[in-house]
Amino acid sequence: MSIQAINVRNQFRGKVAAIIEGPVVSEVDVETPAGIVTSVITTRSIKDLGLKPGSEVVALVKATEVSLAKL
């Protein structure tokens, strides 16, 4: 599965590794070939999408700014 309107570099296919559910928002850890990607989404969206550990998903990354600091 791929979302064509989004640059392929911003898509990470993977499986849900863990969900930390909160009353309003939840954290979803997605295991991808590039590593773990964590998404914070509404708990309602998790239920609507039927997400659970092992679910196959595509993480879409939208970043308007990336900051770096020299170590």
Image: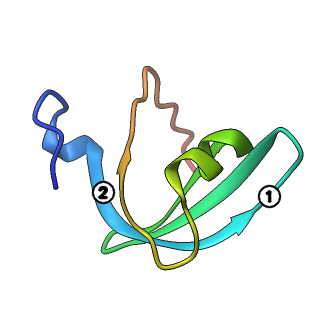
Q: Residues within 10 Å of mark 1 (few under 14, many from 20)?
A: some
Task: Tell me which residue sits at (15%, 44%) in the image.
Answer: 8
Tell me which corner region of the image, top left, top right, bottom left or bottom right, holds residue 55: bottom left
- Per the image, the residue denoted by label 1 is 21
Task: Tell me which residue sits at (19%, 31%) in the image.
Answer: 6
Give the colour scheme shown.
rainbow
The label on residue 4 is none
- Per the image, the residue denoted by label 2 is 12
Q: Secondary structure at mark 1?
A: loop
Quadrant in the picture for the N terminus: bottom left
The answer to whether residue 62 is above or below residue 39 is: above
Direction from residue 64 to residue 22 in the image, left or right: right
Q: Position of residue 34 (x, y in %)?
A: 34, 69
Q: Which amino acid type is marked by label 1?
A: Glu
Q: Secondary structure at mark 2?
A: strand
Task: Tell me which residue sits at (46%, 31%) in the image.
Answer: 66
Q: Position of residue 23 (x, y in %)?
A: 89, 45
Q: Position of residue 28 (x, y in %)?
A: 62, 59
Task: Tell me which residue sits at (52%, 31%) in the image.
Answer: 67
The answer to whether residue 58 is above or below residue 60 is: below
Q: Nearer the viewer, residue 3 or 31?
A: 3
Q: Nearer the viewer, residue 63 or 69?
A: 63
Q: Which amino acid type is marked by label 2?
A: Phe
Residue pushed farthest right? 23
Direction from residue 44 to residue 24 in the image, left or right: right
Residue pushed farthest left? 4
Q: Residues within 10 Å of mark 2 (few under 14, many from 20)?
A: many
